[in-house]
Amino acid sequence: MGEKGKVTIYDLAQRLHTTASTVSRALQNNPRISLKTREAVQKLAKELNYIPDPVAHHLRTGKGNVLGIIVPRIDRNFFATIISSFQNHAQKHGFQVIIAASGESEELEANAIKAMIAKKVDGVAVSLSTETKDPVYPEMLAQHNIPLVYFDRLPEKVSDCDSVCNDNFQIGYDAVVQLHKLGCCKICHFAGPFVQPSYSDRYKGYRKALEDLGLPFHDEWVFQNSITIEAGTEAAQRILQMENRPDGIFSAGDFPAITAIDIFRRKGIKVPEEIAIIGVANEPFDNYLSTPLASFDLHQQRIGEMAAKLLLSHLGEIPEMSHPSHLIVNHNLILRDSAI
């Protein structure tokens, strides 16, 4: 036994009358080792509760078989689904995943990166916090030969790194077109923080659709940084006080949209007859509201899968992909009562 009774590959090798290198390859399911030997090694490892030493593995192979993923919030189904998909795909290739949440803090995001470097992760996927405009850590990761993939929320310039996101300009454009089809002529926007290109692109798509359709635009119809329930409450209350009240809302996220539906309902404002609403993210609860929310499905499972694939490609675990790659995941509008 090793230190403090910890089982090592040398213990397994001694029990099976073979070499430590054979055991190591068998644990990695290397086809150079016979199936019989692989099965015997893996069976004994399970019986003895063998746990690989990540530091030793890293020294031997240069890889720790660990990927990191950082999201702004874990308490959002959107990001939870991405994490699950990312993890499932990584595990299929023998990688474990370290998960961190920035809490929308640029400092905590950078600290998470430093912690992952210290843990010797092999690659990192990041969705930026709302505070992060120009991340400083790509250079740190590059110094340690750790590939970086941005997903969903990207920096303004991602030319040197891989990225996975939706066509956010088109989402904003499509939302306005659908609201106009319903007869909406005064369309407002619950916008995200413009420091993030994903939100600024949705705003740009919204503005371009208004222009193409000949619809009016007013500054007071754009509610910036409105991606939370609290911000949605404030925006909906301001709309109720307007003399020139909008008849359509494109919300950059679902949470402010569901809040607005509830506030309008309690004030006797009919949705969608008096004001139609479209959100983004297609949260699971959208279909169970008093007025089900129409929302864009961003296919977050695909986002998580592609982020993992890009990192695994860098590490030579799957066929080589071109790098840097900037992948666009399709979206589609799920029509429900709030916009039909």
Image (cartoon, grey):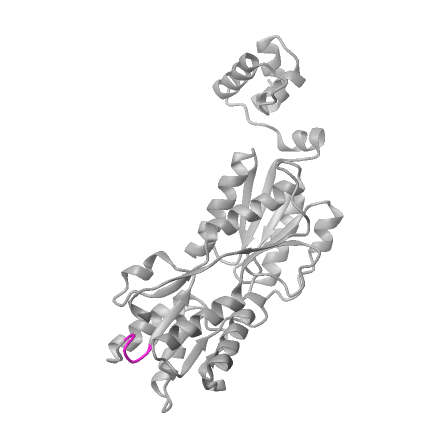
Q: Residue furthest right?
A: 143
Q: Is residue 320 left or right of residue 167?
A: right
Q: Nearer the viewer, residue 199 or 45?
A: 199
**Image quadrant in which the N terminus is located:** top right
Q: Quadrant of residue 144?
A: top right
Q: Is residue 212 left or right of residue 53?
A: left
Q: Is residue 309 magenta?
A: no
Picture residue at 44% right of the left edge, 66% below the top:
253
Q: Nearer the viewer, residue 55 or 182?
A: 182
Location of residue 33 with respect to 134 vertically, above or below = above
Which region of the structure is painted magenta? 271-275
Q: Is residue 274 magenta?
A: yes
Q: Nearer the viewer, residue 108 or 42?
A: 42
Q: Percent position (x, y) of residue 339?
A: 33, 70
Q: Quadrant of residue 280?
A: bottom left
**Image quadrant in which the C terminus is located:** bottom left
Visible residue check, residue 233: no
Q: Residue furthest bottom?
A: 243
Location of residue 100 with respect to 188 vertically, above or below = above
Q: Percent position (x, y) of residue 299?
A: 45, 54
Visible residue check, residue 310: yes
Picture residue at 66% right of the left edge, 61% below the top:
135
